[in-house]
Image (cartoon, rainbow, N blue to C red):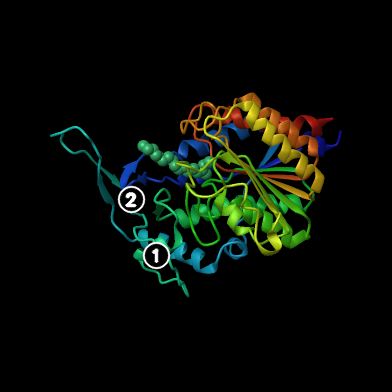
Amino acid sequence: MNKELLLPISAVFSPRIQEHTPPFELWRGLPDPHYDKPEIAKLIHKGLIHLANEGALEIVEPTQRNIKSIICETHTTTYVEYLEWLSAYLSTQPEMIVPKITSIPNMEVEVKRYPAFAFPSIFPRERNVRESKKRLIDLGLFANDTGTPVMANTYEIASLSAATAITGADLIISGKKVVYCGSRPPGHHAEEDRMSGYCYFNNAAIAAQRIYNKTKGKIAILDIDIHHGNGTQQIFYRSNKIDYYSLHIETEGVAPNFGGYEEEVGVDAGIGHNHNYPLRNGFTDKEYFHKFEQVMDKINNIRPDYLILSLGFDGHVNDPLHIGSLTTEAYVQMGRKINELQIPLLIAQEGGYNLENLDDYLVSFLKTLVISYEK
Ligand code: SP5
Ligand code: ZN
């Protein structure tokens, strides 16, 4: 029997992504729990091991060759080197003590200790970044929000996450039909020179750029994370080589808080290559699938050579962010539809914060891609 048919999916994964441990995020200036917890890495691993034990996929470690220069094909060198510098700087700094915010009067203030971290505090509107200034205060030049803390290992683990997508891209280039990249931290909110929304390097964009540079093929990115991928949109906004399709909750009050509207269609050569499908707050599965079908038709019409899927499970009805009402069956249905396209597929993991069942969502979704290739 042909081995290709028995092991149709490659999954790129490093257990070291659980070393990314953001302490908390700042929301309106106060510490709030950070949803991208290291347990998510463990659940992704658990799901992949389950599928590997069934013979449905093989797990591959990301390679570490040339990662920085490949990241710099998508992000500015100034940004990449600033994050590299800041991480190194934080590794020299002492622990930080943070009081736990409480509204209870006269309560004794609890404190928590964390390895050194940094948040941006100044966001200059007019930026003139000639070179990375390499000062702590410059972090606001490279960030959109205060949900994306930097720690001593942020550069290393964000690079590892990008390496996961780069290795996946190389597998696709060499002829693999379906590759899942267990990328964490996620990527789709990261712009060419700004971190935000838990994202530092845009893994899906880096993979798309890599595949384009090596093959010159037509590429479509489909983003089904429930948030708008402002970073992916920004990176390819002028491009007619890489089309971006996003289904997401309207951004009013939800990350990324600005943009994601239908009228954002691209600029210059990119006009007509950016496609936003915002959903109103409280959308139903029926409304979701109505738009999803439209996107599928469009992608089927342009028949890209490669499809990149930004896969987020944060629209699931049981996600702690409580944004969407999608069931596991809804994700399975999407997987089947995507599989029907029969276009070489690279999947980059984005959001999804359920700390109990994320592995089930992933297993159910990836199984839809195995079955048809087993025929
Ligand atoms: C990749 C991805 O899914 N990023 C999502 C970033 C979401 N960040 C916002 C999380 C919610 C902030 N907390 C506000 C709660 C008010 N008490
Ligand atoms: Zn998300």
Q: Quadrant of the C terminus?
A: top right
Sequence-earlier tag: 1 or 2? 2
Q: Position of residue 332 (x, y in %)?
A: 68, 28
Residue closest to the far bottom: 130
Viewer-side residue, 209 vs 244: 244
Rendered residue at 76%/43% (across/down) = 298
Cα separation between marks 1 and 2: 27 Å
Q: Position of residue 196 (x, y in %)?
A: 47, 52
Residue 327 seen in the figure: yes
* Pointer 2 residue: 115
Residue closest to the far front: 263
Looking at the rendered image, the disc whose residue lies closer to the viewer, 1 or 2, is 1
The part of the image, by quadrant, that contains residue 316 is top right
* Pointer 1 residue: 124
Q: Decide: few, some or many residues near mark 1? Use Cα within 10 Å; few <14, some 14-19, many ≥20.
A: few
Q: Quadrant of the N terminus?
A: top right
Viewer-side residue, 85 vs 314: 314
Q: Is mark 1 within 8 Å of ligand 1?
A: no
119 in relation to 85, above or below: above
